[in-house]
Image (cartoon, rainbow, N blue to C red):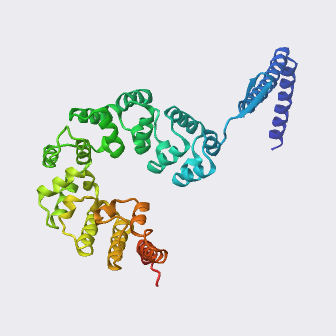
Amino acid sequence: MHSTGKRNFLAVIRLLFTSSSLIRNAGFRNSLSATFATRCSTLCLNDAEESVVSSTRVNHRKKVECVGEKENVREIPSSPLQVLRRWGCDDNEISKLFTRRPALQRANVAQLEFKLSLLKPLGITSSDLVKILNCRPRFFSCRIHLVLDERINYFMEILGSKEVLRRVIIRNPSLMLYDLDDKIKPAIEFYKGLGCSQQDLVAMLISRPTLIPRTNFNKEKFEYIQKTGVTRESKMFKYVAAIIGVSRMETIEEKVRNLEKFGFSEEEIWHVCGKCPILLSLSVEKVQRNMTFIIASMKLPAHSVVKHPCLLLLNLESRLKPRADLVKRVLEMRLKPLIKEVNIFTALRMSEKRFLKVYVMCHPQDIAAELMEFYEKSKNMKRLAEKYKKYIRKGFPF
């Protein structure tokens, strides 16, 4: 035990003598000081670099443009809100944009600024931007810059002007996203092959925004076009071709069967669709409700629709029913309208101002007030019906 402790003590003494000799070594002393100096200089250099980077970032935050003796300081935007304000959006428009697309508040500032810069040359305004996001909320999440120049040049060649291109983009912002070679060009070339002119294509793209992605023709659809009796030289051909082209076969067949329930033959149905192609865009429910009112309340024959397709287009609650009721009330009171021998079909097509002038304002003040009250009450029935439906959905008792 004692001998072991003695040996350990002697080992420690030897280690101390060895260390002192190493310290006296000039080479080690130089390398140690060199290493220490290198480490210190490295630390100082890193601090200097960090200082330069931080100062560069601070300087990058501000852009100074000297014009003569004046200096305009332009700060780089730090949030999507600032980007949109600088682009020209007011607070109301920004609120609408953020409401429609909440993720826009967290968008990458640089990417948002870049994408907005692509829209400016197209003439897109701040109000247009609200319409675009209302239609396509994820618009700024997509790669709108891909083949942009080629896409714009192609549309300019097809549409003829930048203003028309702006209108078409607002109607369907996805035109900036569809594949140019696989989607856009084949659809346009197809309609060109049908004989559609440049003016026809403009009208089709504006009236049918989904023309490019949903166009699909087969033998049956070409037969439907022939059944309408509309020739390629007719002004209605482009509308007939467009609406049949974008509609599914099942939808077309369902709408034809719905009209057949009211006693129309297939020939009559396609004849009406040739005169008014937009009938094929009406829902089955709307047609049923209008036809029921025309037959049951207005006491008109179902086939009056063949001559007056507008009967199916008019809004039942805000136009068709209030005006039909008022004309009936005027006749019941044995009053005469301003224009003699005016029929109900003409009355339904009049503007609101013209209609009131002919049927209400031409009478003495007390009678006009009574008729106006009756008319407003009839129009307000729609609001009451909507309120009733809302309360029923929420389960509120009356």
Q: Is residue 386 left or right of residue 270?
A: right
Q: Is residue 382 above or below residue 195?
A: below
Q: Is residue 366 above or below residue 303?
A: below
Q: Residue at x 32, y 35 (%)?
A: 199
Give how far across and how far down residue 209 sits, in percent.
35, 45
Q: Is residue 357 left or right of residue 291?
A: right
Give how far across and how far down residue 34 sits, in percent.
81, 18
Identity of the residue furthest to the bottom in this view = 398
Give the quadrant of residue 337. Answer: bottom left
Q: Residue at x 24, y 68 (%)?
A: 291
Compare residues 63 and 308 and report the one nearer the observer.
308
Q: Residue at x 85, y 16 (%)?
A: 25
Q: Is residue 28 above or below residue 349?
A: above
Compare residues 6 and 288 and report the one nearer the observer.
288
Give how far across and how far down residue 178 sits, in percent.
37, 38
Give the quadrant of residue 231. Answer: top left
Compare residues 132 and 224 and report the one nearer the observer.
224
Q: How many marks?
A: 0
Q: Is residue 55 visible?
A: yes
Compare residues 322 and 270 and report the one nearer the observer.
322
Give how far across and how far down residue 247 sits, in percent.
25, 50
Q: Residue at x 33, y 64 (%)?
A: 347
Q: Is residue 230 left or right of residue 141?
A: left
